Structures are given as structure tokens and as C-alpha cells.
Image (spheres, grey):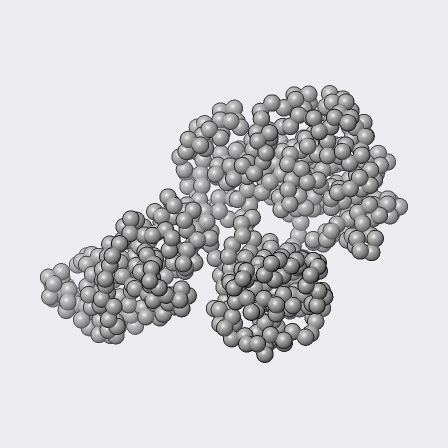
Amino acid sequence: MTIEPNQDKCPKRSNISARLGTLLVDLGIITKEQLNAASKMPTDSNGSSRLADRLVELGYTTRTEVTKALARLSGRTFVHVEQSMVDPECLGILPRTFLESNNILPLTTGDDRLVLAAEHFTDLVLINEIAKRTGLSVVVLAATGDNIANVRSAILEHSSHNLPAPQPARDDELDKLFHDIDAEQLSVIEHKEDEADLEASASQSPVISLVNQIIKAAVRASASDIHIEPTETNFHVRFRVDGDLIAFAQPPHRLLAAVVSRIKIMAALDISERRLPQDGSISVNIGQRSIDLRVSTMTARFGEKVVIRIIERDERAKDLTTLGFMPDMLEQFRTILHQPNGIVLVTGPTGSGKTSTLYAALDEIVTGNNNVSTIEDPVERVLPGVNQFQVHPQAGFTFASAMRSMLRQDPDIIMVGEIRDPETARLATEAALTGHLVLSTLHTNDAVTAIPRLINMGVEPYLAAATLRGIIAQRLVKRNCTECSGTAPLTEAQAAFIQHFHDGSLSTANFTRGTGCRACNSKGTRGRIGVYEFLALSEPRLCTLIRSLGAGAYEMPKSAPAFVHDGLMKASQGHISVNALMEIVTTLNSEHAERSNQLRVAA
């Protein structure tokens, strides 16, 4: 695409306003009488645009004709944008939210120049902002707002993989901080705050302000983690939102050491230690919210990498009814939670919501008549009526040692954050045998694999059969945005996926997906919902099968990921899209896609 617009300086807005009506009359687009009628309407400070709006509203002309006239007066070239004019490679040059709020569309880049179409093509402040953000010379073409919005929506609909990831909102002063911090200021990080109020300290040294703004932006974006990743020339700051890593900022590399040191001081870590990994925690206040930050540092090739887990301290445990359980599965889960003893396991990979499920389960069964205790690493939120203990491996207070001590504390219900070693597995089994209800997690792909995992840890098969009450496997799937979700026809791949994992009764269901809007930052999804597999171990035939496993535990037949069936039911109800579910399933081993399931048949 070759366009050579007239790039002379735009005339002042007042001149454009005075000449717009005259030009439209001279071109024969409107009559003098029509101009007089429109001119008598009230105007605001943006006179030219207001006159244009009145002419269009009164039906005297079209938006396209008015835009052409304004482009001629301002020295811009008018263009009707087509999808073929847009180079996908340049779409990520500006955040999607910025494109939408200002109704602009990048077309091409090259020779240190950005060509874009804009509805407000006479706005010099906007043009200067684009030049500042991109570092390129900006060539602005005039186009109608509807034309730009329609093309952008079409590209989003058909080529969403080419668009940039949504950007969390940034404070305007953040970019300024990158440039304002000089070498002398990098050492102004000499104090430690036990309880840092980020709002109160925002006016302190630039390095402190920079770290504070990154944390505040992550909390506002509902991020679960902050990643600080060094490269050779800068370092990337990314937030994990709804499972995806989203780019936030790329400060220059010269700030990395100061930023990492500031985080280490806040987390009571050794700022002089840059070779070995370190872990720490920070407590901060953001407005009225109390936030806990878990900090992990590790040295990479170009500097120290930092990951910060964000945990809202005062957030209440979610209710089981809000997690996404289907009614029949929820009833089964509640049944085993109210049994007097046994082991209940929640399985899934890291970040699949296992802790939230356990907290919701505890909230369900805590009463004033029982003693409920937890062993966690770390304690993520306070549970009323529950005795919560945090492990300290460096001091010798591990899951296993905590279990031994807790069993002398007369507990009724015990929650162990994770069964990760043979001693903890043995103690959990013994606790279940002696009349305690034990809730815990395992890292397995599906529910049935948890059984051989326990046996491999040294739990005898007959003890596993006697103590296991139920196993839940779960994943988190992106939820459709309720603002822009609509019916979407199935592709061949989606139809084949449904046919493979379901009996065919969903073939006529109305599946939906989000198309992208301002509310969801053009992603089409907002938040996540759980999809679950529930395996109850009360059936005698199933217990007999577990007892027979012995040393051949890992030869136990694998099941199809039954949570896929649960996910398809949620997709048919409009909660998630089929594509979002397919993304989860592709992460599993192919063996889990087999339909045969000897264990389930035995049950």
C-alpha cells in the first residue's frame, strides 16, 4: 500500500469550523439554507465537529462527505479503510484499549514511520501521544469512525491471533518514571517497611514509586502474579490475568537492579545475594485492601528474575455453589464432605484452583462443634473458625512434622495443603483410619491417577481402598464475557471434538463465545470457571480393584479427562466457549483422550 498524504500542519480548529460550512456549500453538498439551519443549533468548543454532527443528524449530508470536507480543510488524505490495507504486523504497536478509546487503526509501518487511520484526525494532542508511545513519525489519514470501528471489529473477529494482548491500564506517569530516574536516585532504597501502604509512599523516591505502581496496576488488573523478566536491553513486566501472561511495561535494563533490590528489601531478603534463589513475603495496603505478596527471585542470564504471587488477605473463601459445580456433582461432593472420616483429594496442575476448592469445602463443613485445622504453605486467606498453621521448612516445621503435632491437638477435620512426600501420605492415611476427615491436594492430570500416585508413595493398596472417599480433578477455563457473548456456529474441528468426548446429544445445542468488547478488553472472556471430574470411591467393586493394584499401580488404566464432559455441558449452557475448553484438553497427554475406562466400568 502506497499513500502520500499532505502532511502540512493542520489549520487551527476555529479556522476549520468557519470554513467547513462554506466548503460544503461550494462543493454543492448542502445549500446555504441548510447551513444556516444547522448553524443556528447550539455548538460547543469543538465547533467544527458539532456542526458536522448537526448536518448529519438533520439529514443534509452523510458522515463520509463531512469527513472528506474536514480532511480537505485540515490537509489530510481521506481514505475508506479496507481489511486488505491493514498490515497485521503493525497491529501490536499500540495497546488495543488505546486503539478503541481513540478509534484509530494502524495500517502500515516502515522507514521509522507509522501510517494510521483516525476518526479524530485533527487532534494534534492525540497525534503527539501516538508519536511518543511508538517512537515513530506518524502519518494520519482521515476516515469515518464507523469505517474504522467496523474494520477493526472484523479483524478482531477473523484474525484475533494477530492482535496484541490486552494491556492492563497503566498510570500515565509510569513512562515518565522510566526516563526520570537517574543514576544518583538508584541508591535511594535504604529503608524497610514492615507494613507498606503503597498509596502513602507513592510520592517517595522514583524507584519506590515505580515498584508501587507496578503492584497497584497488577492488583487493579486482578492479576494472580507479576513477572519481572530481564533481557539484554530492558526487562519485561508482565501480569498473569485469567491464566494468560499480559505485557505491562518494558523499563530500561539500568533500572533492573534497583527494582529487584527494592522488592528484596520489602520482602526482607538479602539484597547482596544475587547468585542463589530466594523466597520471601510482603504485606501491603492498597486503599482499604490488605494484600499479601509471595516473592521468588532467581538469577537468569541477564539479571535476577522475580515472580510475585498476589493474594488478597481479606478475601473470603468462595462458596461451593459459586465454583461451577453441576448440581448432581455438588450433591455427591457434599455427601463425602459430611462423612466422619476418610481422605478427600483435589487434583490438578498448579494454578487450577485446588486451594479455592478446599477453602470452599472447609467453609461448608466448619461448625462450632468441630475442631478444624489446616497446614498450608502459605496460609492464603483467613478462614473464620479454622486453626491455620503455616509450614516453615527451614525451621524443620514441614507438612509431615506439622501433621504429627496436629494429631495430638484433637482435630476433627484436617486440611493438608499438599501431599508431596511418603511420610505425609502415610500420616494422612493413619489420620483417616483413626477417625479424622482429611482434605488435601495432589498434582495429577485426572482423578484416577491420584490412586497409583498414593500407592507409589508407599500407601498400601488396601489402606488406600479403605480411606479414600472421593477425588476431584479440575481445571480453570476462561468464562465467556457476558457483555459480548453470542451464538457461534461450530467449526468442523469443534464438532469433531464434541463428538469425540460426548454421546452426541449436544449436537443441537447453541454454543456461544465472546466476540470482544470494552468490558473484557477485547478478549471475549472475563474471569474463569472450574470444570470438574468427580470420582466417588464408595463402590465395593472399585475398592476391590484398588486392592489388587499392588506394585503394578502405574499399569492402572487411564480415564478420558471426564472434566471435558463437564466442560461441554457448561459450553452448551453458554458459560464457556468450545475453543476455551479445547485449549485445556490439548495440554493433556494423548493417553488421556482414550474413551475406554476400566476403572469407571468397575465402579
Q: Is residue 172 above or below residue 362?
A: below
Q: Is residue 124 left or right of residue 61?
A: right
Q: Is residue 524 left or right of residue 532?
A: left
In the picture, the quarter occupied by the C terminus is: top right
Q: Quadrant of residue 30?
A: bottom left
- Report x, y in % for residue 406: 85, 47
Q: Is residue 45 above or below residue 321?
A: below
In the picture, the quarter occupied by the N terminus is: bottom left
- Report x, y in % for residue 121: 29, 64
Pick whichever, 365 or 245, lies toward us: 245
Q: Is residue 542 left or right of residue 105?
A: right
Q: Residue at x 68, y 32 (%)?
A: 449
Q: Residue furthest bottom?
A: 184
Q: Residue at x 68, y 75 (%)?
A: 190
Q: Residue at x 79, y 47 (%)?
A: 399
- Specify whether residue 63 is in view: no
Pick whichever, 232 or 504, lies toward us: 232
Q: Is residue 448 above or below residue 425?
A: above
Q: Residue furthest right?
A: 408
Q: Residue at x 72, y 53 (%)?
A: 378
Q: Is residue 299 left or right of residue 9?
A: right
- Report x, y in % for residue 301: 60, 58
